[in-house]
Amino acid sequence: MAESPHIPANPPRGWLADLHLAATFLTRLPLPDPGAVPPGGLAAAMRCFPLVGAGLGLVAGLIAAAASTVLPPLAAALLAVLVLVLATGALHEDGLADFADGLGARGGPERRLEVMHDSRNGTFGVLALVFSVALRATALAAITGAAAKIGALVAAAALSRALIPVAMRCLPPARPDGLAALAGRPGADCALTAFALGALFAGLGLGLAAIPAIACAALVGLGVAELARRRLGGYTGDVLGAVAQASEIALLLAAAALISG
C-alpha cells in the first residue's frame, strides 16, 4: 500500500498568499476569502504578522497625526487607538481581558482556563482593558510631532504582532485541542523572520531609540508568555492576544520616554 503523503508543519506558500491569510486572520477588513487553508498554513503565514501590524500602525498613525492638528493630543491618540481596535475587531484586547480574568481566578490551571473560556468579562478583564487603552493613548499623546507618532505606532503594531509566533515557539499549547494549538506551531525560521521584520519596522519608526524600545517590548511580551507557562501550562489564543497587547503598550511607553519632546 502506498504511503500517505507527508504534510509539513509549515507548508511553503508565497509571501502574498501568507500576507492575505495573515490580514484575514488579524483584521476585520473586507478582504477576499483566502479559501481552504492547508494544515499548518496559518502557522506559516505568521511570518507576515508584522507586515499586517505595520499597515495597521501606519493607518492609525496617519489618523493620529491628522487629528492632532485640530484636537488635543489625548483625543487624537484615543482616535488612533480606536482605529486599531475597530480594524482588528478587538481581537487582542479580548485576549488580554480573558487572560487577566484567568490570572485573577482562584484554583489551578484547569480552573483558570475555564474562566478564560467564559465569554463574560470579569473585574480583572475590564480593568485590563481600561489600562490598555489608557496607557497606549497617554503614551501616544506624549509623543510630539506627526512623524514621531506615526513611527511609534508602526513600530508598536509591527513588533507586538511579531512576538506572537515567537511566544508560540517558546511555549507548549495549554490545551492540545484548543484553537491556538490546532492552528499549528510556527517553525523557528518563521518566528525568526517575523521578529526580524518587526525589529526592522521598529528601527524605521524609532531610529536608534528602537534598540531599548525593542528590548523593553520583548521583555514584557515574553514575560507575559512565561507567566502563562507558570499559571496555565502554556499558550492559548487569549495568551497570544495578551502578549501582543502587553508588548504594544510597553513599546509605546518606551517610545514616549525616549523620543517625546
Image: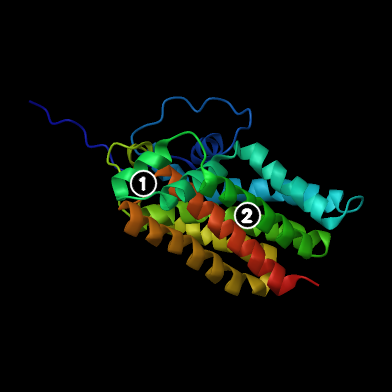
Looking at this view, is 65 or 197 the one in front? 65
How many residues crowd mark 2 within 10 Å: few (<14), some (14–19), many (20+)? few
Looking at this view, is 89 or 206 the one in front? 89
Q: Is residue 74 left or right of residue 32?
A: right
Which quadrant, please, contains the C terminus?
Answer: bottom right
Residue at the disc numbered 2: 131
Q: Is residue 86 left or right of residue 47?
A: right
Residue 203 appears at what percent x and percent y? 63, 66
Question: Is 102 above or below relative to 4?
Answer: below
Residue at horizontal 59 percent and vertical 57 percent from the top: 248
Looking at this view, is 121 or 185 the one in front? 121
Element assignment for label 1: helix
**Farthest residue in the right direction?**
70
Element assignment for label 2: helix
Way the structure is coloured = rainbow
Residue 116 appears at what percent x and percent y? 42, 42
The three-letter code of the residue at mark 2 reads: Phe
Residue at horizontal 51 percent and vertical 42 percent from the top: 122
Residue 155 appears at what percent x and percent y? 64, 59
Quadrant housing residue 27: top right
Residue at the disc numbered 1: 112
How far, Cα to Cα, is label 2 from label 1? 21 Å
Residue 174 in sight: no
Which quadrant, please, contains the N terminus?
Answer: top left
Question: Is 40 above or below relative to 226?
Answer: above
Q: Is residue 135 left or right of residue 196?
A: right
Quadrant housing residue 118: top left
Residue at horizontal 71 percent and vertical 42 percent from the top: 83
Looking at this view, is 82 or 1 the one in front? 82
Residue 98 appears at what percent x and percent y? 47, 44
